[in-house]
Amino acid sequence: AQSVTQLDSQVPVFEEAPVELRCNYSSSVSVYLFWYVQYPNQGLQLLLKYLSGSTLVESINGFEAEFNKSQTSFHLRKPSVHISDTAEYFCAVSDRGGGFKTIFGAGTRLFVKA
Amino acid sequence: NAGVTQTPKFQVLKTGQSMTLQCAQDMNHEYMSWYRQDPGMGLRLIHYSVGAGITDQGEVPNGYNVSRSTTEDFPLRLLSAAPSQTSVYFCASKVQGSGRGNSPLHFGNGTRLTVT
Protein backbone atom coordinates (compact mmCIF):
# COMPACT_ATOMS: atom_id res chain seq x y z
CA ALA A 1 0.00 0.00 0.00
CA GLN A 2 1.09 3.55 -0.62
CA SER A 3 0.44 6.81 1.18
CA VAL A 4 1.31 10.41 0.50
CA THR A 5 1.78 13.21 3.02
CA GLN A 6 1.83 16.83 1.99
CA LEU A 7 3.28 18.66 4.92
CA ASP A 8 1.64 22.06 4.38
CA SER A 9 -2.05 22.62 3.77
CA GLN A 10 -1.57 26.27 2.77
CA VAL A 11 1.46 28.24 1.63
CA PRO A 12 1.14 32.03 1.27
CA VAL A 13 4.01 33.70 -0.57
CA PHE A 14 4.71 37.04 -2.21
CA GLU A 15 5.06 37.35 -5.95
CA GLU A 16 8.61 36.73 -7.25
CA ALA A 17 9.59 34.93 -4.04
CA PRO A 18 10.78 31.29 -4.08
CA VAL A 19 8.50 28.53 -2.86
CA GLU A 20 8.79 24.89 -1.82
CA LEU A 21 5.83 22.54 -1.43
CA ARG A 22 6.75 19.45 0.52
CA CYS A 23 5.73 15.88 -0.20
CA ASN A 24 6.69 12.63 1.51
CA TYR A 25 5.50 9.21 0.49
CA SER A 26 5.43 5.70 1.88
CA SER A 27 5.32 2.55 -0.22
CA SER A 28 6.24 -1.12 0.00
CA VAL A 29 6.91 -1.23 -3.76
CA SER A 30 8.68 0.98 -6.25
CA VAL A 31 6.58 3.90 -7.41
CA TYR A 32 6.31 6.65 -9.95
CA LEU A 33 5.82 10.16 -8.55
CA PHE A 34 3.67 12.97 -9.87
CA TRP A 35 2.69 16.53 -9.13
CA TYR A 36 -0.69 17.73 -10.35
CA VAL A 37 -2.11 21.27 -10.25
CA GLN A 38 -5.75 22.26 -9.86
CA TYR A 39 -6.97 25.74 -10.77
CA PRO A 40 -10.32 26.93 -9.37
CA ASN A 41 -13.36 25.02 -10.65
CA GLN A 42 -11.26 22.76 -12.84
CA GLY A 43 -9.97 19.22 -12.83
CA LEU A 44 -6.37 18.33 -12.07
CA GLN A 45 -3.63 18.70 -14.67
CA LEU A 46 -0.26 16.99 -14.70
CA LEU A 47 2.55 19.37 -13.73
CA LEU A 48 5.51 16.98 -13.79
CA LYS A 49 6.45 13.38 -13.11
CA TYR A 50 9.42 11.32 -12.00
CA LEU A 51 9.79 7.97 -13.72
CA SER A 52 13.51 7.12 -13.61
CA GLY A 53 16.92 8.56 -14.35
CA SER A 54 17.79 12.06 -13.18
CA THR A 55 16.27 12.78 -9.80
CA LEU A 56 15.50 16.38 -10.80
CA VAL A 57 12.53 16.86 -13.10
CA GLU A 58 11.23 20.10 -14.53
CA SER A 59 7.97 21.44 -15.90
CA ILE A 60 7.52 23.86 -18.76
CA ASN A 61 6.39 26.69 -16.48
CA GLY A 62 9.43 26.82 -14.20
CA PHE A 63 8.54 24.32 -11.48
CA GLU A 64 10.95 21.54 -10.57
CA ALA A 65 10.85 18.60 -8.20
CA GLU A 66 13.59 16.43 -6.79
CA PHE A 67 13.20 12.76 -5.97
CA ASN A 68 15.04 11.76 -2.81
CA LYS A 69 14.86 8.02 -2.34
CA SER A 70 16.53 7.93 1.07
CA GLN A 71 14.13 10.49 2.49
CA THR A 72 11.18 9.24 0.41
CA SER A 73 10.42 12.80 -0.62
CA PHE A 74 9.43 14.58 -3.81
CA HIS A 75 9.36 18.28 -2.97
CA LEU A 76 8.17 20.83 -5.55
CA ARG A 77 10.03 24.12 -5.96
CA LYS A 78 9.89 27.28 -8.00
CA PRO A 79 12.54 30.01 -7.71
CA SER A 80 10.16 32.88 -8.49
CA VAL A 81 6.37 32.56 -8.36
CA HIS A 82 3.74 34.53 -10.24
CA ILE A 83 0.19 35.48 -9.32
CA SER A 84 -0.98 32.95 -11.91
CA ASP A 85 0.64 30.12 -9.91
CA THR A 86 -2.11 30.47 -7.28
CA ALA A 87 -3.73 27.02 -7.26
CA GLU A 88 -3.89 23.79 -5.31
CA TYR A 89 -1.05 21.33 -5.82
CA PHE A 90 -1.30 17.59 -5.31
CA CYS A 91 1.50 15.08 -4.93
CA ALA A 92 0.66 11.54 -6.08
CA VAL A 93 2.23 8.09 -6.39
CA SER A 94 1.49 5.16 -8.67
CA ASP A 95 2.97 1.68 -8.39
CA ARG A 96 5.41 0.63 -11.08
CA GLY A 97 3.38 -2.39 -12.08
CA GLY A 98 0.00 -1.77 -13.57
CA GLY A 99 -0.48 1.56 -11.83
CA PHE A 100 -4.08 0.70 -11.08
CA LYS A 101 -4.28 2.95 -8.05
CA THR A 102 -2.87 6.45 -8.08
CA ILE A 103 -2.83 7.71 -4.50
CA PHE A 104 -2.99 11.45 -3.82
CA GLY A 105 -1.91 13.61 -0.94
CA ALA A 106 -4.31 16.03 0.74
CA GLY A 107 -3.11 18.95 -1.36
CA THR A 108 -1.31 22.24 -0.71
CA ARG A 109 -3.01 25.50 -1.51
CA LEU A 110 -0.47 27.99 -2.87
CA PHE A 111 -1.57 31.59 -2.55
CA VAL A 112 0.63 34.15 -4.30
CA LYS A 113 0.22 37.70 -3.07
CA ALA A 114 1.10 40.88 -4.97
CA ASN B 1 -10.57 16.65 -28.83
CA ALA B 2 -12.90 16.91 -25.82
CA GLY B 3 -10.84 14.72 -23.46
CA VAL B 4 -12.83 13.65 -20.37
CA THR B 5 -16.39 14.98 -20.16
CA GLN B 6 -18.46 14.81 -16.97
CA THR B 7 -22.15 15.56 -16.58
CA PRO B 8 -23.85 17.14 -14.77
CA LYS B 9 -21.63 19.90 -13.37
CA PHE B 10 -23.84 20.42 -10.33
CA GLN B 11 -26.47 18.25 -8.64
CA VAL B 12 -28.53 18.47 -5.48
CA LEU B 13 -30.13 15.31 -4.11
CA LYS B 14 -32.24 14.47 -1.14
CA THR B 15 -31.21 11.67 1.18
CA GLY B 16 -32.25 8.33 -0.26
CA GLN B 17 -32.47 9.46 -3.87
CA SER B 18 -30.48 7.74 -6.57
CA MET B 19 -28.59 9.17 -9.49
CA THR B 20 -25.89 8.46 -12.05
CA LEU B 21 -22.88 10.64 -12.71
CA GLN B 22 -21.79 10.38 -16.32
CA CYS B 23 -18.23 10.22 -17.61
CA ALA B 24 -17.08 9.87 -21.20
CA GLN B 25 -13.63 10.05 -22.78
CA ASP B 26 -12.65 10.20 -26.45
CA MET B 27 -8.95 9.32 -26.11
CA ASN B 28 -9.42 5.54 -26.37
CA HIS B 29 -7.99 5.11 -22.87
CA GLU B 30 -8.33 1.63 -21.41
CA TYR B 31 -8.20 2.85 -17.80
CA MET B 32 -10.91 4.97 -16.20
CA SER B 33 -11.51 5.87 -12.59
CA TRP B 34 -13.65 7.87 -10.19
CA TYR B 35 -12.32 9.99 -7.34
CA ARG B 36 -14.03 12.11 -4.73
CA GLN B 37 -12.43 15.29 -3.46
CA ASP B 38 -13.13 16.52 0.06
CA PRO B 39 -11.47 19.45 1.87
CA GLY B 40 -8.29 18.42 3.66
CA MET B 41 -8.45 14.88 2.31
CA GLY B 42 -7.25 15.24 -1.24
CA LEU B 43 -8.62 12.83 -3.82
CA ARG B 44 -9.72 9.34 -2.83
CA LEU B 45 -10.22 6.57 -5.34
CA ILE B 46 -13.75 5.15 -5.45
CA HIS B 47 -13.70 2.62 -8.31
CA TYR B 48 -11.62 2.01 -11.37
CA SER B 49 -11.74 0.01 -14.60
CA VAL B 50 -8.95 -1.33 -16.81
CA GLY B 51 -11.21 -2.07 -19.75
CA ALA B 52 -14.75 -2.83 -20.86
CA GLY B 53 -16.35 -5.36 -18.53
CA ILE B 54 -13.64 -5.04 -15.86
CA THR B 55 -14.07 -2.96 -12.71
CA ASP B 56 -12.53 -2.99 -9.24
CA GLN B 57 -12.79 -1.17 -5.95
CA GLY B 58 -10.63 1.68 -4.80
CA GLU B 59 -10.15 3.18 -1.33
CA VAL B 60 -13.76 4.28 -0.65
CA PRO B 61 -16.16 2.12 -2.71
CA ASN B 62 -19.08 1.81 -0.28
CA GLY B 63 -22.31 3.38 -1.49
CA TYR B 64 -21.22 3.52 -5.13
CA ASN B 65 -21.61 1.20 -8.10
CA VAL B 66 -19.93 1.26 -11.48
CA SER B 67 -20.05 -0.61 -14.76
CA ARG B 68 -18.04 -0.40 -17.96
CA SER B 69 -19.86 -1.56 -21.04
CA THR B 70 -17.83 0.48 -23.53
CA THR B 71 -14.30 1.87 -23.66
CA GLU B 72 -15.65 5.43 -23.75
CA ASP B 73 -18.09 5.50 -20.83
CA PHE B 74 -17.74 4.87 -17.10
CA PRO B 75 -20.85 5.95 -15.12
CA LEU B 76 -20.90 6.17 -11.33
CA ARG B 77 -24.16 5.26 -9.59
CA LEU B 78 -25.33 6.34 -6.17
CA LEU B 79 -28.13 3.96 -5.23
CA SER B 80 -29.30 5.72 -2.06
CA ALA B 81 -27.61 9.06 -1.50
CA ALA B 82 -26.42 10.06 1.96
CA PRO B 83 -25.17 13.44 3.25
CA SER B 84 -21.70 11.88 3.66
CA GLN B 85 -21.58 11.62 -0.14
CA THR B 86 -21.64 15.39 -0.52
CA SER B 87 -18.42 15.99 -2.43
CA VAL B 88 -16.84 16.92 -5.72
CA TYR B 89 -16.48 13.90 -7.99
CA PHE B 90 -13.82 13.59 -10.65
CA CYS B 91 -13.54 11.10 -13.45
CA ALA B 92 -10.06 10.39 -14.80
CA SER B 93 -8.63 8.22 -17.55
CA LYS B 94 -5.23 7.13 -18.76
CA VAL B 95 -3.44 4.80 -21.10
CA GLN B 96 -3.17 1.39 -19.48
CA GLY B 97 -1.18 -1.75 -20.03
CA SER B 98 1.60 -3.80 -18.51
CA GLY B 99 4.09 -1.54 -16.81
CA ARG B 100 2.11 1.61 -17.63
CA GLY B 101 1.94 2.93 -14.09
CA ASN B 102 3.90 5.89 -15.42
CA SER B 103 1.01 7.19 -17.50
CA PRO B 104 -0.55 10.37 -16.09
CA LEU B 105 -4.25 10.71 -15.40
CA HIS B 106 -6.46 12.98 -17.51
CA PHE B 107 -9.23 14.55 -15.46
CA GLY B 108 -12.69 15.89 -16.21
CA ASN B 109 -13.86 19.17 -14.68
CA GLY B 110 -15.84 17.51 -11.92
CA THR B 111 -19.39 17.17 -10.64
CA ARG B 112 -20.29 19.03 -7.48
CA LEU B 113 -22.85 16.95 -5.57
CA THR B 114 -24.80 18.09 -2.53
CA VAL B 115 -26.97 15.66 -0.58
CA THR B 116 -29.43 17.24 1.85
Image (cartoon, coloured by chain):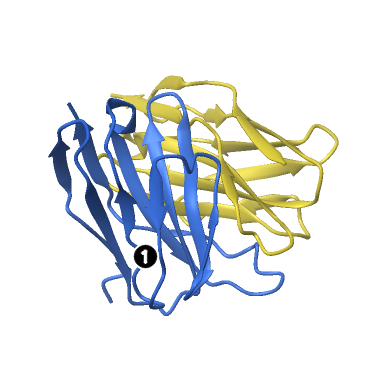
Chain colours: A yellow, B blue
The answer to whether B75 is drawn above or below residue B42 in the figure is below
* A4 sits to left or right of A111: right
Can you identify the residue that label 1 sits on? B74
Q: Between B7 and A75, which is closer to the camera in this rendering?
A: B7
Give the residue type that dot 1 points to: Phe
Q: How many marks?
A: 1
Q: Quadrant of the N terminus of chain A?
A: top right
Crowd tier of the residue under label 1, counting other residues whose Cα lies within 10 Å: few below 14, some 14–19, many 20 or above:
many
Q: Position of residue A108 (x, y in %)?
A: 47, 28
Q: Residue at x 41, y 21 (%)?
A: A13
* B71 sits to left or right of B24: right
- Label 1's element? loop
Kindly identify which chain the residue marked by label 1 belongs to.
B
Let me know if residue A22 appears in the view: no
Q: Quadrant of the C terminus of chain A?
A: top left
Q: Residue at x 33, y 27 (%)?
A: B84
Q: Between A83 and B101, which is closer to the camera in this rendering?
A: B101
Q: Between A66 and B31, which is closer to the camera in this rendering?
A: B31
The answer to whether A67 is drawn above or below residue A73 in the figure is below
Let me know if residue B21 appears in the view: yes
Furthest-right residue in this view:
A70
Q: Position of residue B40 (x, y in %)?
A: 44, 24
The answer to whether B74 is drawn above or below residue B64 in the figure is below
